[in-house]
Image (tube, grey):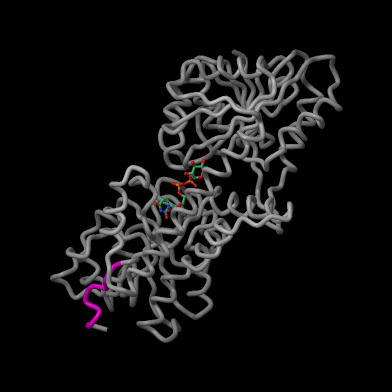
Amino acid sequence: MKIAVAGTGYVGLVTGVCLASKGHDVTCVDIDEEKVEKMKKGISPIYEPGLDELMQQSMDHLQFTTDYGAAYKDAEAIFIGVGTPEKQDGSANLAYVIKVVKQIAQSVERDCVVVVKSTVPIGTNDKVESYLRERLVHDVKVDIASNPEFLSQGTAVLDTLHASRIVIGVEDEKAGEVLKNVYEKFDAPIIVTDRRSAEMIKYASNDFLALKISYVNEIANLCEIVGADIEDVTKGMGYDARIGKRFLNSGIGYGGSCFPKDTKALSWLASFNDNEIKTIRAAIDVNENQKLKLVKKAKKYYEDFTDLNVAVLGLTFKPGTDDLREAASLVNVPILLEDGAHVKAWDPVGAENFKKLYPKKVDYCSSIEETLKDADICFIFTEWDEVKKFDIKKYEQLMRKPIVLDGRNCYSLDAFADTKIVYNSIGRKTVNSELM
Ligand code: UDX
């Protein structure tokens, strides 16, 4: 099938490459010439495990262009995968989606289905339909379908090729058939709904996961107070299939391009309709506080951070990505710097992006050892494998004062038993607390 994809970010590019890998002829459109040139050579502009390889294997079925007219005019399905960033008031900014819809209206010369993959507020597909139909230049029938994306960064390719489900929201049976053909070779359950329900499935799913994390973080905070252990608690909870084992990891809160944005968007949507979605509001508030957890813990050991050597391990919002959006590091590092700390940071792929924001104030290190050298305290913000596999004895050997604040529970408590390291994690007892 001839397919066009608008936008080559995480959603657009991964979708395009995965569809091409199944034999569809896919043209990916982006406004950025430089990015397009790179992709033509089989190089992905984003860091995503497995994407470069799949792109190179699928090059026979892949094209990249800035010429949207040529890409859209005879495509049978046009996927929209552009960003819907958060606006000041928390609502989703649809400017990029609308711009693409306008270009599609000017370009299409055959009947086709426009598939909205970007996360958009409920009712957007209806608006897209009337906006597009009013502007169509040629006499063609264009249907709109909602097909939300559930991929996670770091596992985006796997999540797309082996999707937990494919949701298709349509108002027209034929449009549904076109999409079923698109996904014919994907081994995943297909759920066909009306468009508004499909749009809601995306928000309800993401916000439920965010709520689950905030819930577990509140339980973790309580565990610290009452002397329980969150790892044991969640293990005990997870055996109940109704709760499930996944997404029960406590830490310094969720970040990324989806949960923070989608929780705010649903909350905004509810309040705009004179409604209140209290659970999601609570998840947002809990998460904002949770992100400050390590700085608050650090105050137990040091009244202020002036001239303190601080080691920061991990800058990205999670491992497996170079994305910093809504990462805990972005909240904590500025506080440390403002308080006069000397910050040394390590991240295997996120340091370059962080450097764009803090080019001089932070010392970027190429190894964990270098970061820890002479540090008075260490903050762990991301559970990179390198951190999890790090020989913990080195914290004691390298740091001036071995105080490790772990926002991602990378280590077992037992591992610190025979050390002089103060190990303070989330929802668990502090090991060697008597040493400080
Ligand atoms: C998320 C959804 O998982 C995905 O389905 C959707 O399409 C986009 O948003 P993503 O943001 O890439 O994906 O990452 P995810 O793995 O869900 O993690 C988001 C944040 O939650 C990270 O900061 C992560 O550290 C945090 N998290 C996740 C926890 O704190 N605890 C957990 O148990 C799981």
Question: What residue do we see at 86% from left, 27% from top?
Answer: 134
As rendered, which of 347 and 304 lies closer to the eye?
304
Question: What residue do we see at 40% from left, 56% from top?
Answer: 347
With 257 as the anchor, is 172 left or right in this view?
right
In the rendered image, the quadrant that contains the C terminus is bottom left
Count how many numbered circles sit on residues in the image.
Answer: 0
x%, y% of residue 233?
A: 29, 59
Residue 376 appears in which quarter of the rendering? Answer: bottom left
With 123 as the anchor, is 260 left or right in this view?
left
x%, y% of residue 195?
A: 66, 31
With 319 as the anchor, is 59 left or right in this view?
right
Residue 203 appears in which quarter of the rendering? Answer: top right
Dominant secondary structure, magenta: loop
Question: What residue do we see at 81% from left, 30% from top?
Answer: 130
Question: What residue do we see at 66% from left, 52% from top?
Answer: 86
x%, y% of residue 416?
A: 19, 68
Q: Which residues are magenta?
A: 428-434
In the rendered image, the quadrant that contains the N terminus is top right
Can you name the residue that lies furthest to the left here?
Answer: 418
394 over 349 or under it: above or below: below
7 over 174 or under it: above or below: below
Residue 50 appears in which quarter of the rendering? Answer: top left
x%, y% of residue 177?
A: 61, 15
40 over 119 or under it: above or below: above
The answer to if 430 sits in the magenta stretch is: yes
